[in-house]
Amino acid sequence: MTVKTSKQTDHGFDGISDKFAKNIYGTTKGQLRHALLCHHLTSLGFVDKAPMQVLDSGCGLGHMAEFFAHAGHDVHGIDISSESITYARQAAVNQHLNIDYTIGSLQSVTRQYDLIINHAVLEWLHEPYEAINLLLKQVNTGGHLSLSFFNKEALTFGNLVYGNFDYVKSGLKVKKKVRLNPQQPLSVKAVITYLNNLSHIEVVHQAGIRCIHDYMRDLEHQTIHYEALLDAEIKYSTQSPYMWLGKYFHIVLRKI
């Protein structure tokens, strides 16, 4: 689900794909994140467009690639994890979908695309801004880049609410890292500032992802009130101040 840089190797998920499927997409947090991203991309008109060339970079288990393939787009998924690609290929076969999956890094992408998706990847990279630049080079003029990343401010706020004051004081650093926990959350403000300084792009969409779910006191409500929760997440995801509390943040860029 990551790319490699020349200096360090970024995080991958070989050996834990089944655990990833169960602990992320088998829970309301993963299901809700996917549903919200699909909602926003649909609302922006991407899904119902004439067939596009779509790249899901860091495709993981293939959920977003499948979403666009079902809509009739020409989809390519790439991931550094061979285990994740094997999982995604089998899922595509099971659903009779024609998705071109490749094991590889971001640097190996040479084609141009109308839409590039990069969701829940940047927070695993040592050089996330370099990755953004590389992705933009592969977007056709007039095309779009959809970014979603783990929100450092939301992570800080959530831990303050949970009473994890020492963890916050340490700068959100732990001695023992858990492989499913993002290694490098990004500041939304810093990312937006960086993007605004780039030439030939415009930000066409911003939204918080899971602005409510992760702060609910009664965790049972995440399941028993899921539909009402989804409606509320959609409503408040683009409204200040709620959008800034999203555990993930979603930005769509258009290449001019």
Image (tube, helix red, strand yellow):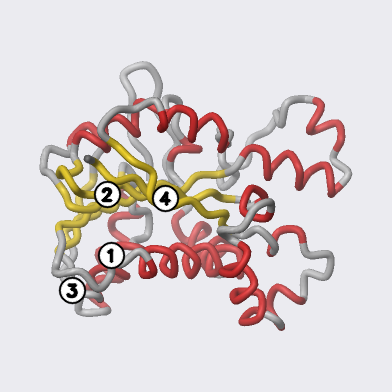
Identify the residue at horizontal 83%, vertical 70% (top origin). Answer: 218
Q: What's the residue type where badge 4 is placed?
A: His
The Cα atoms of the two marked residues, 3 and 1, are separated by: 11 Å
Q: What's the residue type where badge 1 is placed?
A: Phe
Q: Say which element carries label 4.
A: strand
Contact between labelled residues 1 and 3, with CB atoms less than 8 Å apart: no
In the image: residue 61, left or right of residue 217: left
As drawn, 6 above or below 108: above
Q: Nearer the viewer, residue 252 or 101?
A: 252
Crowding at dot 2, Cα within 10 Å, few <14 / some 14-19 / many 20+, comes out as: many
| Disc ID at residue 72 | 3
As drawn, 26 above or below 5: below
Q: Which is more foreground, mark 3 or mark 1?
A: 1
Identify the residue at horizontal 34%, vertical 45% (top origin). Answer: 253
Q: Say which element carries label 3.
A: loop
Q: Is residue 174 visible?
A: no
| Disc ID at residue 119 | 4
Contact between labelled residues 2 and 1, with CB atoms less than 8 Å apart: yes
Q: What's the residue type where badge 2 is placed?
A: His
- Of mark 1 and mark 2, the one earlier in the sequence is 1
Q: Which residue is mark 1?
A: 46
Q: Which is more foreground, mark 4 or mark 2?
A: 2
Q: Nearer the viewer, residue 61 or 165?
A: 165
Q: Position of residue 67 (x, y in %)?
A: 32, 70
Q: Say which element carries label 1.
A: loop
Q: Position of residue 232 (x, y in %)?
A: 64, 72
Q: Say which element carries label 2.
A: strand
The Cα atoms of the two marked residues, 4 and 2, are separated by: 13 Å
Q: Position of residue 195 (x, y in %)?
A: 41, 32
The Cα atoms of the two marked residues, 2 and 3, are separated by: 18 Å
In the image: residue 154, left or right of residue 24: right
